[in-house]
Amino acid sequence: MTAATAASCTSPSDTPLCVRRDARGVVTLTLNDSARFNALGSEMLTALQQALDAIAQDDSVRVVVLAAVGKAFCAGHNLKDMAAHPDLAWYQQLFAQCSRMMLCIHKLPVPVIARVHGMATAAGCQLVAQCDLAVAADCATFATSGIHYGLFCATPSVPLVRNVPAKRAMEMLLTGDFIDAPTALAQGLLNRVVPAEALDAEVEKLVQSILQKPRAAVAMGKALVYQQRELGLDAAYQLAGQTMATNMMDAAAQEGAQAFAEKRTPSWKL
């Protein structure tokens, strides 16, 4: 993989819709359709899916950062395109395609960090909620705004209610009103909020912390957290216990335990 590659899908001006950059085991995927506010049309979803599928097969990747260019992070689906295709099968295909992409983020064995510099609405807000971690500029805004146009944000509600308390999520979904970044932070949609000029540095802090941890432990941990959340208490503890036992058999965990006993810093092959 070169330092910078573009997904095969392009905009009408032949501009790549999603650009991949690699460095230090960190992949930055940048939504690159500022003219359409990085809307999640079929072409953008295809570009993202191709990039995520490649990452899923790349054991050298440790962290993914999802970024965007232009005024908006992501404006969700393009309602103009949707209005031009009043066909149930077309709508079903679009939302199924979007759900597949969101689930791919969920299933990746490495953390995905949303770097949110601007507005994230509807499926764009869904994209932020679906990422494992999210850092935003203090000027960023968030909304599940479909209800303003008669469309309840049903698919965005899936990760939203898994991040935000139920009544807060329901207020966003029923009103479609914007919330600012500090409010999104307080409600659990974001991990950190910083001034726009500090956004890259704050993302880098998270990246560096993750890079210092064994990939296998991070992968097992990410999978476990999401699996046990959907289980009853007994089953969750059973799964968590089995995961910890398996994790302890990994060479990195054995080295970590030995280093703790010897009061030294672990020496990992990261």
Image (cartoon, rainbow, N blue to C red):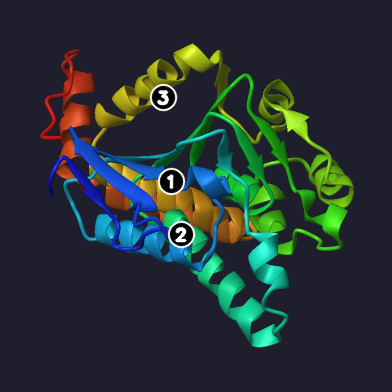
Q: Position of residue 115 (x, y in %)?
A: 47, 32
Would you name the residue on which mark 1 appears? 31
**Picture residue at 16% right of the left edge, 46% below the top:** 60
Q: Which mark is residue 203?
A: 3
**Front-lying residue, 213 or 35:** 35
Q: Is residue 170 left or right of residue 132?
A: right
The reply to whether discs 2 and 3 touch (Cβ–Cβ < 8 Å) is no
Q: Position of residue 57 (x, y in %)?
A: 22, 61
- Which amino acid, by three-letter code, is at mark 3? Val
**Picture residue at 47% right of the left edge, 20% below the top:** 199
Q: CA distance from mark 1 to mark 3?
A: 17 Å
- The vertical placement of 200 against 5, above or below, is above
**Front-lying residue, 92 or 210:** 92
The reply to whether discs 2 and 1 touch (Cβ–Cβ < 8 Å) is yes
Q: Is residue 112 left or right of residue 160?
A: left
**Picture residue at 28% right of the left edge, 58% below the top:** 56
Q: Is residue 77 left or right of residue 151?
A: left
- The vertical placement of 4 against 90, above or below, is above
Point out the tag, 1 or 3, that comes first from the N-terminus.
1
Would you name the residue on which mark 2 appears? 44
Dot 3, crowdedness within 10 Å: few (<14), some or many (≥20)? many
Query: Where, by quadrant of the figure, is residue 67 drawn?
Result: top left
The quadrant the C terminus occupies is top left
Q: Secondary structure at mark 1?
A: strand
Q: CA distance from mark 2 to mark 3?
A: 24 Å
- Which amino acid, by three-letter code, is at mark 1? Leu
Q: Position of residue 80 (x, y in %)?
A: 69, 63
